[in-house]
Amino acid sequence: MTSELEQTVSGHLELEQMVARLEASGGYRVLRRVIRRASVHAPDGTATRRGIFLDVETTGLDSARDEIIELAMVPFDFSEDGRIFAVYESFDALRDPGRPIPAAITALTGLPTRWSPEPRLTLRRSPPSCVPQHSW
């Protein structure tokens, strides 16, 4: 009789084999769900700083023409040596750019070319101090 742990590990390995085959075909890119953990390292009195993971999705890279369509942020506490001590509630908001999203951006982000999100994000246009970019 196999244990629940053995079944879980076996199932995970099967999924990873499927992912490897899909990605090897060149026709697929498989994204993995990030499992949120409230704590990574137990607090030990080490001085910490607050950081934020920030993801910005746009309709393109032209700051005069393109729009921010999604913001996602996850605050966390970390130490100078890189250990993460706490991960806090995330923020994610969509914004309708008022026009179809270009096909290349849809392919990159997975957001549909047209959709009607609740207006949860309001941005004021101001001169950019930096150009948003994707880093893989």
Image (cartoon, helix red, strand yellow):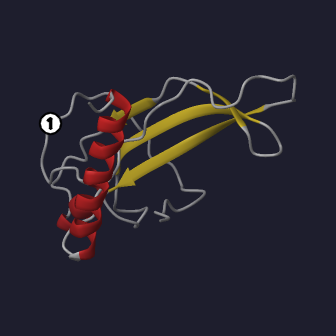
> 58 and 27: which one is in front?
27
- Residue 46 left/right relative to 112: right
Three-letter amino acid code at the position of disc 1: Ser
- Residue 43 left/right relative to 47: left
Residue 116: image location, x then y, percent: 14, 36
Q: Is residue 61 visible?
A: yes
- What residue did someone put label 1 on? 116
Residue 95: image location, x then y, percent: 29, 39
- Residue 44 left/right relative to 8: right
- Residue appearing at x 26%, y 30% in the figure: 1
The correct choice, above or below, for 3 with respect to 66 in the image is: above
Residue 41: image location, x then y, percent: 70, 30
Q: Is residue 121 visible?
A: no
> 11 and 71: which one is in front?
11
- Residue appearing at x 22%, y 28% in the figure: 118
- Residue appearing at x 16%, y 50% in the figure: 112
> 25 and 52: which one is in front?
25
